[in-house]
Image: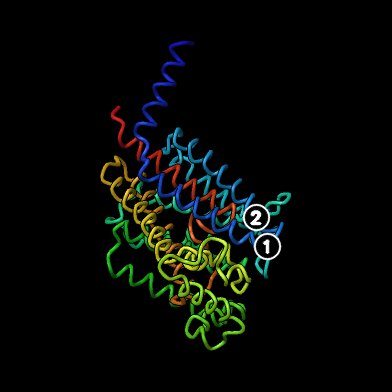
Amino acid sequence: MASLNNFMFYKLFIYLKKFDFLLFVPVFLLLIFSLAEIYSIALSNDSLGLINFKKQAFFIFLGMIILFLLVFFDYYNFRSFGSYLYIFGVLILVVVLFFGKTVRSTRAWFQIGSFSVQPVEFIKIILILFLARYFSGVSIKLSPFKHLLISGALSGILISLVFLQPDFGSAMILFALWFFMAIFAGFKKRYLFLIVLILFTVFISGWLFFFKDYQKERIKTFLNPSENSLAEGYNVNQAIIAVGSGGIMGRGIGFGSQSQLKFLPESQNDFIFAVISEELGFLGVFLVFAFFSLIFARLIIAIKYIKNDFGIYFIMGTISLIFIQMFINIGMNIGLLPVIGISLPFLSYGGSAIISNMILIGISESIIIRSKIKY
C-alpha cells in the first residue's frame, strides 16, 4: 500500500511539473475578468444579477475541477470513444429538438432545476474529437474526395440538427470548425474551393427556404447596422458606443453607462467585450488580447512536441474553435460581423460554455503533459 501511495504521489508530482502553467494562467485571468464584469453588471440588476454572478462563480469552480481531473486522464482514450461520443451527440441533439426548452424561438436547452444546459457547447468538443480521430486514422492523399465527403457528411448531420433548433450561429461555428480542420488535414485548394461552393449553395438555399425572418434581419443589419438603429441594429450601435467610450483606462468597474443604465442588452453574454471596453478601456482590451494570444501561442508551441496525429488534430481543433468564437464575438461587438449569439470564450456568462471551454483546456493540458513525459 505504501509503495502504491508513493507511486501516486510521484505521478502527481510529475504531472504538476509538466503542467503548462503558461497556458493555464491566461485562462484563469480571463475567468477573473469574467467574474469582475459580471459582478459589475449585477450591480444594476439587483438580486437577479447577483444570482447570475454566483452561478458563474460556481460554473468556473466546477470547470476548474473538471480541468484538473482531465489532466490525469489519458487523452488517447478519447480516440477509442470518438465514434460513441459522436452517436451520443446526435442522440442528444435529436432529444433537445423534441424535449428541449425554447428561448427566443430556439429550442436548444435542457432545463435541470434552476440551471439550463446547452448541448451544442459540448457538441463542439465531440466534433473536434471525432474529426481528430477520423483524420488521424486515414490517408487523405490516397482518397481525398472520399474523406472530404465522409467527414463533411458526418459533420453535416450535427450541423443540420443544430440548424433545426434553429441556432444559426452555432451551426456556422460547427461548419467553420470542420472547414479549418479540413485545411489542417491537408486537402488541396480545389477541394477547399468545393467546400466554399457548397457553403454558398447552402446559404442561398437557407435564405430562400429555411432562414427565419429574424435571422434574415440579422444579416441585413450586418450589411448596414445603422439603418435600423431602434430595432435589430440597436444592440450593435449601443455596443459600438460602449467600445468607443472607454478611452485608455476606462470608466471603471461598475461605472459603465451603457451597461449600468441598461442601454446595452445581453451585456453579460454576447456583448461582454463591449462592457470590458467601456469599463476597463484600451488597457483592459489589450490585456484580453494578450491573454488570448498567450493561449494560442502555448497551444501552437505544444504541437511541435506532440507524438501522435490525434493529439495534434485535437490541439488544432481547440485553437480553431477558441479563435473562431473570439473573432466572431468581438466582430459582433464592433459592428464588423452580424449578431449571431456567439459567446466570448472564458468571458461570457453561461455554464455550458464555461465548462466546455475548460474541458478543451483540460484535454489540451493532458496532451501537453504526456508529450513531455518520456516513457
Query: Quick check: marks 1 and 2 in contact, CB under 8 Å?
Result: yes
The structure residue drawn at horizontal position 63% and vertical position 57%, both measured from the top left corner, is: 94
Residue marked by disc 1: 45
Asked if 253 appears above or below 307 in the picture, the reply is below
On screen, 30 above or below 157? above
Amino acid at pointer 2: Asn
CA gap, disc 1 to disc 2?
10 Å
Measured as percent of width and height from the top left, residue 33 is found at 49, 54
* Residue 169 on image: x %, y %: 53, 68
Label 1 Cα crowd, 10 Å radius (few <14 / some 14-19 / many 20+): some
Which of the marked residues, 1 or 2, is nearer the chain's N terminus? 1
Q: Position of residue 14 (x, y in %)?
A: 36, 27
Along the line of sight, the residue nearer the viewer: 181 or 137: 181
Residue extending furthest toward the bottom: 227
Under tag 1, what secondary structure?
loop
Question: Is residue 161 shown to the viewer in this render?
Answer: no
Q: Nearer the viewer, residue 2 or 85?
A: 2
Instruction: Name the residue tied to disc 2.
Output: 52
Which SS class for mark 2? helix
